[in-house]
Amino acid sequence: MEVPKPIKSLQYEAMRRTLVLPPRVSQRMFGAPPVNDRGTALDTQAHTLLSLIKATKQPELHTLTVRRAREVYDEATQTMDLKAPWEVKTYHGFVPGKRPVLYEVYRPHHVKSRNAPGILFFHGGGFVIGSARGHAAIAKYIAHQTDSVVFNVDYSLAPENPFPCGIEDCVAAFNHVVNQHHSFGVDPKRLMVLGDSAGATLSINVSQAQVEAGRQTPYKQILFFPTTDAGPYASRELFGEGFFLSHELINWFSNTYLGASKFEIANDPRALPRRFKRKSELPSTYIVTCGFDPLRDEGEAYVKDLVKAGVDVHHHDAADIIHGFITMGGVLNSAKTYIDRALEHATSDL
């Protein structure tokens, strides 16, 4: 049964009030935050949020139909995301082709230059869920904070469009903006890719595809907690249950996205970016990993790969927070702090 919107509003208000309780009160209600393998305690608000999710028996996304999982995920991101008081000019477009790719463009009102920096934003959601609409608030915030024109790309999702369709859409979108940069008023030499989770992996995919095709690569790739490999990493075991992104959900995403080709692409660098052979040709990279994320260790391994390859790479360890925080800035103070810090450092040279 669908929860009426007034009840959802009450639930959000109750959650918000609980999350701003003093740490001492929160710990009396939910216990002390867990400590990870590196001796770092989980952020108190993140611990409270996870405790509320567990206590209210929120549905596990992998147990739902794909359609319902998408609805629930978009509702959650829109509930927890930053609430936008900022002003941006918004317009819509599409990339023509066999699968027209829709996108929204956000230009801050104070950005008058017709040669502004540009960012293609790819949302997270395991290549199966998520949408430009569900991530619109954070994409607009990125535009506002970086004085950039942001292209919020609504790439196709599995299972309707399995691997590598989403990659093809994102590559097509990047080249579309490069080719039409005059009409968008952006500087093609300062065109970046930015994504979270699956969107971060798609950002890497764009850079890799451009290298292989001998075309212009992004000026920079800004990656929030990407998936880069499928190996037996310790963090997948340590944080695979109870920290927002679970073993079961990862497996559901993988099976849905890769489908029958899962075992045929064991070394395909599009699915596993750590296997890409030409890393030295990748653009400057800013990567954020989380201390309580199943994907933490493979993200850090990717950083080491890039350093070894001679890529200009900057790594920020968000040591006390969970996967997916980029759309939690409206309810977790530390999430907004990490977002602001990443955007400031990643775009300081524009």
Image (cartoon, helix red, strand yellow):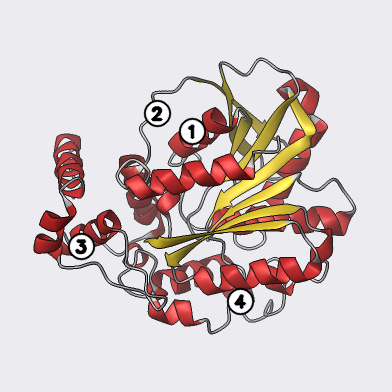
Task: Identify the residue at image location x=52%, y=81%.
Answer: 233
Which residue lies most toward the right here? 214
- Dot 1 or dot 4: first in sequence order is 1
Residue behind mark 2: 84
Circles 2 and 1: CB atoms closer than 8 Å: yes
Q: Identity of the amino acid at label 2?
A: Ala
Is residue 349 depicted above or below 91 in this figure?
Answer: below
- Dot 2 or dot 3: first in sequence order is 3
Q: Identity of the amino acid at label 3?
A: Ser
The residue mark sitting in front, 3 or 4, is 3
Residue 297 lies in quadrant:
bottom right
- Dot 2 or dot 4: first in sequence order is 2
Residue behind mark 4: 262
- Characterize the local packing of mark 2: few (<14), some (14-19) or many (20 or more) Cα atoms within 10 angstroms: some
- Characterize the local packing of mark 3: few (<14), some (14-19) or many (20 or more) Cα atoms within 10 angstroms: some
Q: How many numbered marks does the figure carry?
A: 4
Q: Identity of the amino acid at label 1?
A: Tyr
Instruction: Work out how far the residue at label 2 is from the one at label 3, CA to CA, in angstroms.
Output: 27 Å
Task: Identify the residue at image location x=50%, y=69%.
Answer: 295
Return the x and y of residue 86 as percentages of the image width and height: 44, 23
Return the x and y of residue 21 as percentages of the image width and height: 15, 48
Residue behind mark 1: 141
Classify mark 2: helix, strand or loop. Answer: loop
Classify mark 4: helix, strand or loop. Answer: loop
| Whether residue 272 can be seen here | no
From the viewer's perspective, tell me whether residue 311 is left or right of residue 124.
Answer: right
